[in-house]
Every structure is written in structure tokens, then in C-alpha cells.
Amino acid sequence: MKLNPYLTFNGNCAEAFAFYEKCFGAKIGLMMTWRGSPMEAHAQPDQLDKIMHASMLVGDTPLMGADASAAHYQKPHGITVSIGMTEPAEAERVFAALSEGATVTMPLAETFWALRFGMLTDRFGIPWMINCERPQ
């Protein structure tokens, strides 16, 4: 069994995934709109150029997402995407990159359990935790 995050956006999935590509040093593997897909006939006209499915690998973990229709979009509530790292410098780089236009709820700092830990909600409304644990 494997868990991986699937993020839902309010019409800006393509922009978010381009941003995450830079932040994580990843590459988008797939980005598909409703237009031209086998599901095109089932899409609302205003949804045709929105993202039906996007994916990238962040390290060895898939990150997937899509645009919700305006009638079905809900801001993330009660969930946070946690990124575990082993190098403080990489944690600082990723946190700084994700912080662009974000609301930082806990600045990245050393804690009793981590070399670096911080929390933010990015400019797309996705909450993140960066955790660089202390070596055991």
C-alpha cells in the first residue's frame, strides 16, 4: 500500500505545478486538460482548458493534482502535506521557495525533534510542513 497526496485547485493547477516544479527541483510527468481527452464531452465548457490530472515525482513520492470545477472546489481543511528531509540546507531552500507569496504559520527553525521544522500555506492555499528530523 502506498499513500500519496492529490491536491485540488481552484483553476490554477497548471500554475501551481509549474511553481512546485521549481520549488522541489522536480519535473512534471503528466499534465492533461479536459480538452482533447476521452472525457472532453463530460466537461463543462469553462472547464475544458483546466487541468484534469497532473503528476510529478518529488523524490520518489508522486504528487498529483487537478482543478476542481468552480461548483465543487473547497479549500484544504484539516490536512497538511508533510515533506521529510535529511539535509537542513535543502529544508531551508524548499521552505524559502514555497514561502514565496505564502502565509508562514511557523517559521523554519530548529526544534527539539528536528534540525529544521516549519509550516506555511502556499499562495495556492495548500498547507505544508517541512521537517528535517534529527539523526537517530
Image (spheres, helix red, strand yellow):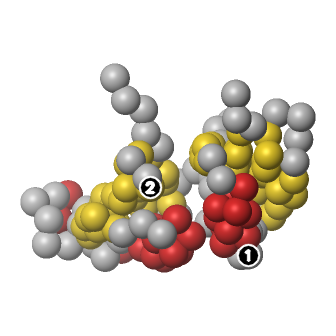
User: Callout 1, which amino acid?
Assistant: Gly
| First reached walking from the N terminus: tag 2 or tag 1 | 2
Q: Residues within 10 Å of mark 1 (few under 14, many from 20)?
A: few
Dot in front, 2 or 1: 2
Q: Which mark is residue 58?
A: 2
Marks counted in the figure total 2
Left or right placement of residue 81 versus residue 51 in this view? right
Left or right placement of residue 67 versus residue 73 in this view? left
User: Callout 2, which amino acid?
Assistant: Val
Left or right placement of residue 39 versus residue 31 in this view? left
Do the residues under discs 2 and 1 have CB atoms within 8 angstroms? no
Describe the element under mark 1 as helix, strand or loop. loop
Circle 1 residue: 101
Q: Quadrant of residue 68?
A: bottom left
Q: Is residue 49 above or below residue 125?
A: below
Distance from label 2 to label 1 (Cα)? 21 Å
In which quadrant will I find the N terminus? Answer: top left
